[in-house]
Image (cartoon, grey):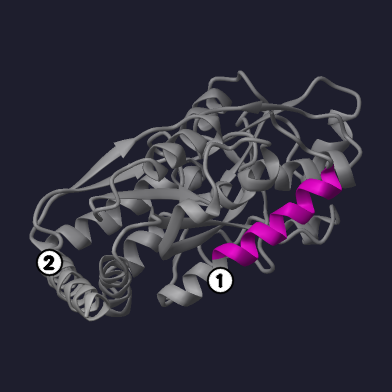
Amino acid sequence: MRRAFAAVAFAVIAQQAFAQQALAQEAWPSRNVRFVVAFAPAGVADPIARFVGQALQEKWGQSVVIENRGGAGGNLGAGLVARADPDGYTVLVTTSSFSVNLSLYDKPGYALSDFQTAAVGATTPNIIVAAPGLKFTTLPEVIAAAKTGNFSYGSAGIGTTPHLSAEDIFNVRGKADIRHVPFTGAGPAIVALMGGHIQLAVVALPGAIEQVKAGGVKAIALTTAERRADLPGVPTVSETGAGNVVTATSILFMMPAKTPAAIVAKFNADFNEIVASGRLDKPFAAAGAQPMRLDQAQAQKYVVDEIAQWAGVIKAANIKQE
């Protein structure tokens, strides 16, 4: 009798909890949603977050607030969201550095198990750019000059895919000792490049494309398999003879692990609906990014595969960050 009573009581409590959870999920979002961008403004994640945020707030009828929390190659922002209330109102917007840092750092401040992947927002290639006054115009010339000169390059931070791509191209394959100067985002790296504080920068394309088109910086090479139609004069790394290097930076939308599954699923569905509408095609293309349309399971697998890919690069380049 006691067991039967306990079973009935548990069933009632569970049913009430489920009903309350379902009610809360149906109402989501009922207030502002915060996008925590793990990098400084003007980097690859920031414009994508703003484009997506604008589209979603129009769909939801609720504001999407952008908060930039750059630092430690994206770890600060990721750690903040990992500890946030799992109520669906705090979303991490980060890059492939999320995947990289799990192998790069002994203690990144978060684990994959702390998150659910809500969406893979976009991918974009990395680009090598030079200060406008640098006399060298090709990647082989840059690498050759760096072997006899004091060259440095900037990136959006240690462990970003531009940083790892640069180490592979410059120092592993090219045997050039080009010093890495990490910044809190692509924007600060490009500013330093234009100011003559560094000779080169390797960043995700959205962080540099406007300055490339305006002549503020000089494009050297792209980490794409083929040339881009919007930058027809910029060769691929492979074309220059510097190695078959094809890499990309992904922009990820992540929620705390204990966020109700229905909320994560709604975010994914709403994002994919916007992508399917073509609403993001033009702004993403202008920023040098390609929107992605993956369901939640595909998005989660994408991140798992990306973690494995960059772990291999880190091991080959013998890169470690404490």
Q: Is residue 127 left or right of residue 80?
A: right
Q: Is residue 269 visible from the viewing direction of this image?
A: yes
Say the numbered circle drawn on residue 20. 2
- Residue 174 coordinates in the image, percent (x, y): 88, 43
Q: Is residue 247 visible from the viewing direction of this image?
A: no
On screen, residue 14 above or below 115 = below
Say the numbered circle drawn on residue 301. 1
Q: Is residue 222 left or right of residue 5?
A: right
Category of crowding for the residue at label 1, using alpha-carbon neighbours closer than 10 angstroms: few (below 14), some (14–19), many (at least 20): few
Q: Residue at x 50, y 43 (%)?
A: 208
- Residue 241 coordinates in the image, percent (x, y): 86, 56
Give the image quarter of residue 166. top right
Amino acid type of the residue that numbered disc 1 sits on in the rendered structure: Lys
Q: Residue at x 14, y 59 (%)?
A: 29
Q: Which residues are magenta?
A: 303-317
Q: At numbered mark 2, what does the secondary structure look like: helix, strand or loop?
A: helix
N-terminal-most mark, 1 or 2: 2
Q: Residue at x 32, y 42 (%)?
A: 84
Q: Residue at x 69, y 28 (%)?
A: 322
Majority secondary structure of the magenta segment?
A: helix
On screen, residue 74 above or below 244 = above
Residue 304 is one of the magenta-drawn residues: yes
Q: Nearer the viewer, residue 230 or 191?
A: 191
Are circles 1 and 2 on residues that touch, CB within 8 Å?
no
Q: At numbered mark 1, what does the secondary structure look like: helix, strand or loop?
A: helix
Category of crowding for the residue at label 2, using alpha-carbon neighbours closer than 10 angstroms: few (below 14), some (14–19), many (at least 20): few
| Quarter the N terminus occupies | bottom left
Say the numbered circle drawn on residue 36. none
- Residue 298 coordinates in the image, percent (x, y): 50, 76
Amino acid type of the residue that numbered disc 2 sits on in the rendered structure: Gln
- Residue 5 coordinates in the image, percent (x, y): 18, 77
